[in-house]
Amino acid sequence: MPFPSPDRERYVLGDVSAHLSFLNCERISDRQHIHHWAVEPHFHEGLSQLFVFAGGRIDALIDSEHRFIEGPALVWLPALITHGFAYPQDMAGWVLTVPTRDVSLLAATSQWMASWIDRPQILQGVAHQPIIDKALALIRTIEAEHDLNDEVQSAVLEAQFLLMLAQLHRGLQQLEGERTPPGEPRSQLLRAFLTQLDQRFLEVRSVSEYAGFLSVTPTHLSRVAKAMAGRTAAELIQERILLEAKRKLALTDLPISEIAYELRFSSASYFTRFFTARVKATPKAFRLKSRA
């Protein structure tokens, strides 16, 4: 298989700044014209994924380990975990893609998932059939909700996704302690940085401060970020701020000046320059386009 690389648009909607609602729901078949049922090894920065397979035998590479997955199955992949799949043609399956920030917020209030949420997980086999059947029914409900577009959609999707994670948790509880080992040290460091970033981006903008939280040097943190995510630590900080700006513009009616204030910009004009330089549209134009 080819060497894994970051993916920002081939197998997902886009990078984390493109994910404005709580989650994105797609069928595996939706991108078969791109992957032709064989997804090359890749990873995502700032995006976690839950795969729901209705059946079939999937040839998988997960975190550098080759394995076969017998559907029906649930597969949880945190951000930065390398994965690739060879699917049976025309198989039924779905993938839920959720920004890591939202997963971190859920984990902070749902301690029951703390022991497994940051590592790949696979639930398959006859012993787990009742749980997987519930997940299959739930994914179809999520798919229908995803097609709606109203003021409560994100809240409903968040609740449904939490139910999906609860089903996965119950299945994992039935296993006898077997867990996928954590990834290599650079992946661990980058995941820890992104977790800190999700929790602190409004107050902390300095690479040096994040490096201090993680007990590494700023240079090492930036080198790891560049090697693993294709962006420096400073660029990842700016991307996280940009995502929050996009969400507030698209999903709220807050004045642009108030959004600038909430995101800790010194002035609305500075916020407008920051946003326009990266999105190639003013905040006002972006808001109008997102609601068209």
Image: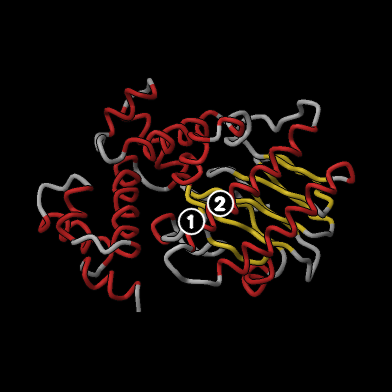
Q: Amino acid at mark 2?
A: Ala
Which residue is painted at 80% across and 32% down in the image? Answer: 175
Q: Residues within 10 Å of mark 2 (few under 14, many from 20)?
A: few
Are the residues at dot 2 and dot 1 in contact (C-beta closer than 8 Å)?
Answer: yes
Give the residue number, with chain letter if any, for mark 1. 155
Q: Which mark is residue 159?
A: 2
Residue 176 pos. (x, y %): 81, 27
In this rendering, the count of numbered labels is 2
Residue at the far bottom in the pictured view: 292
Q: Which residue is drawn at the image coordinates 78% and 53% (left, top)?
A: 59
Q: State the residue lying farthest toward the top.
A: 215
Query: Helix, strand, or loop for circle 2?
Result: helix
In percent of width and height, residue 172 lies at 74, 35
Q: Is residue 30 above or below residue 3?
A: below
Point 17% across, 54% down: residue: 258
Residue 30 x/y as whole percent:
64, 71
Write down the quadrant of residue 12 in the picture.
bottom right
Pointer 1 local density, CA inside 10 Å: few below 14, some 14–19, many at least 20: few
User: Which residue occupies 79% across, 60% down?
Assistant: 54
Spatial CA span between label 2 and label 1: 6 Å
